[in-house]
Image (cartoon, grey):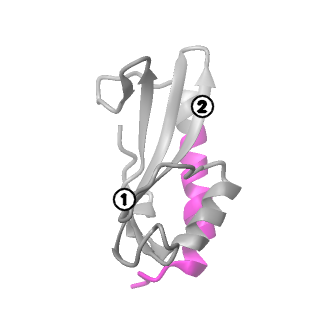
Amino acid sequence: MYFENTGIEDIVADLLILDEVMLEHDLVRAGQWDYERVTYDKKYVVKDGTYYLRIFGYTKDGDVDKRDAIMNLKKPVIGKHYYPFGVEYGEDENFPKSLLKDCQATLEAVHKALQPYNMNKA
């Protein structure tokens, strides 16, 4: 399920800044990257299962491996993990309301924290 109108999808920022700000909000990049793309995850383990709030990013300028990339963030998504298959993002998934509320609060905090670094200011 995608989160609409968060403002996250309009952010363009330096990879090093993103790594720092995302980690402050429990969104971890870890090994989820290649030379042009990154994924920041916040893991939730609740009674109903394991969920991931994910923010994807891509670069048109720079190289993630060299840590000199300018990243364009995409629309955030929440998904449920199914062992051993992976994460499902489908609209048919039922997400706990408390989980969605925490995700929304995280996204608002990240959006606010990234505003001073956003290179895509209109």
Where residue 103 sits, quadrant-wise, is top right
39 vs 88, left or right, is right
Q: Residue at x 38, y 57 (%)?
A: 5
In percent of width and height, residue 121 lies at 44, 83
Check the picture and name the quadrant holding the N terminus. Answer: top left
**Pointer 1 residue:** 74
The answer to whether residue 94 is magenta is: no
**Magenta part of the protein: which range?**
102-122
> What element does badge 2 sit on?
strand
Q: Residue lying furthest right in this view?
A: 24
Q: Is residue 17 above or below residue 105?
A: below
Q: Quadrant of the C terminus?
A: bottom left
Q: Residue at x 56, y 67 (%)?
A: 18
User: Which residue bears the numbered disc 2?
Assistant: 44
- Residue 50 at x, y = what percent? 54, 24
Identify which residue, 42 or 96, lies in the foreground: 42
Q: Position of residue 20 (x, y in %)?
A: 66, 65
Q: Nearer the viewer, residue 19 or 44?
A: 19
The x, y position of residue 24, in whole percent, is: 70, 57
Mark 1 Cα within 10 Å, few/some/many (few <14, many 20+)?
Answer: some
**Quarter of the image holding residue 89?**
top left
